[in-house]
Image: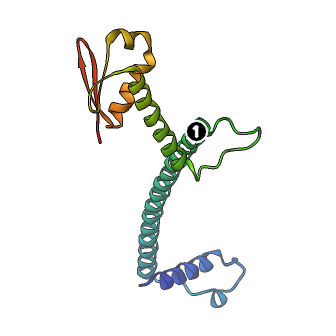
Amino acid sequence: MNLYDAIQILRLHNQYFRCPAHIPDDARPPLVDAWALAEAIDVVLSELHAASYASTQAQLQVDQLQADLMESDEIREKLGHLLTRTAEALKGEPPEGTWHSWHDLPQMAALAIRLADDAAESVICTEGHNTEGRQWVLYPEQIAADPYLEDCIAHLEWRGLADVDRESDGVRLTFRG
């Protein structure tokens, strides 16, 4: 028996028992066979069970999608704040009520790094003592007197622009390239 037929049998059964008492028996809907009624109930219950399971599975998927969406929103918000702070660091505070554009941040960062590279190399070459070729030495007392020198050394080492050897008598930088 299919679901449609089962529903028809249940409707007939319901009509028979809800029929007002004053209606004569020959005008009443037919009484449904007990075996057909039992089979119809089984079919409908089976379909309800399957629909309930499918609904539960769908709800689990909806819950997972909502959790994914919330995580995605959090990540997007964090990245938006990161880009806003990066733009402010590279371009300064924007005028009141406006935001800096983010489209040129890679170029701005590249320019800032290039300028920092040039400035760090210039400071080392100005303050250090050239021993040979592209090799410069800074003495501990120089570094102690000017903490900016340590920042320049760290920058050049981080960028891979110079090999740094820290020795007891100072720091030796050998510029690459």
Q: Quadrant of residue 108?
A: top right
Q: Give the image location of residue 11, x and y in percent.
A: 58, 80
Q: Quadrant of residue 118?
A: top left
Q: Is residue 32 visible?
A: no
Q: Which image quarter holds the N terminus?
A: bottom left
Q: Residue at x 42, y 24 (%)?
A: 126
Q: Amino acid at mark 1?
A: Leu
Q: Is residue 104 above or below residue 84?
A: below
Q: Is residue 156 visible?
A: yes
Front position in the image: 56 or 161: 161
Q: Give the image location of residue 140, x and y in percent.
A: 32, 11
Q: Residue at x 44, y 26 (%)?
A: 123
The residue where tag 1 is placed is: 90
Which secondary structure, mark 1? helix
Q: Which image quarter holds the C terminus?
A: top left
Question: Along the horizontal axis of the image, is 45 left or right of 161?
Answer: right
Question: Along the horizontal axis of the image, is 97 left or right of 164?
Answer: right
Q: Residue at x 49, y 49 (%)?
A: 67
Front position in the image: 127 or 22: 127
Question: Along the horizontal axis of the image, is 13 left or right of 60?
Answer: right
Q: Give the image location of residue 56, x and y in percent.
A: 45, 59
**In the displayed image of the protein, which residue is found farthest to the right?**
96
- Residue count near mark 1 (Cα–Cα under 10 Å), binned few <14, some 14–19, many ≥20: some
Q: Give the image location of residue 152, x and y in percent.
A: 41, 26
Front position in the image: 72 or 112: 112
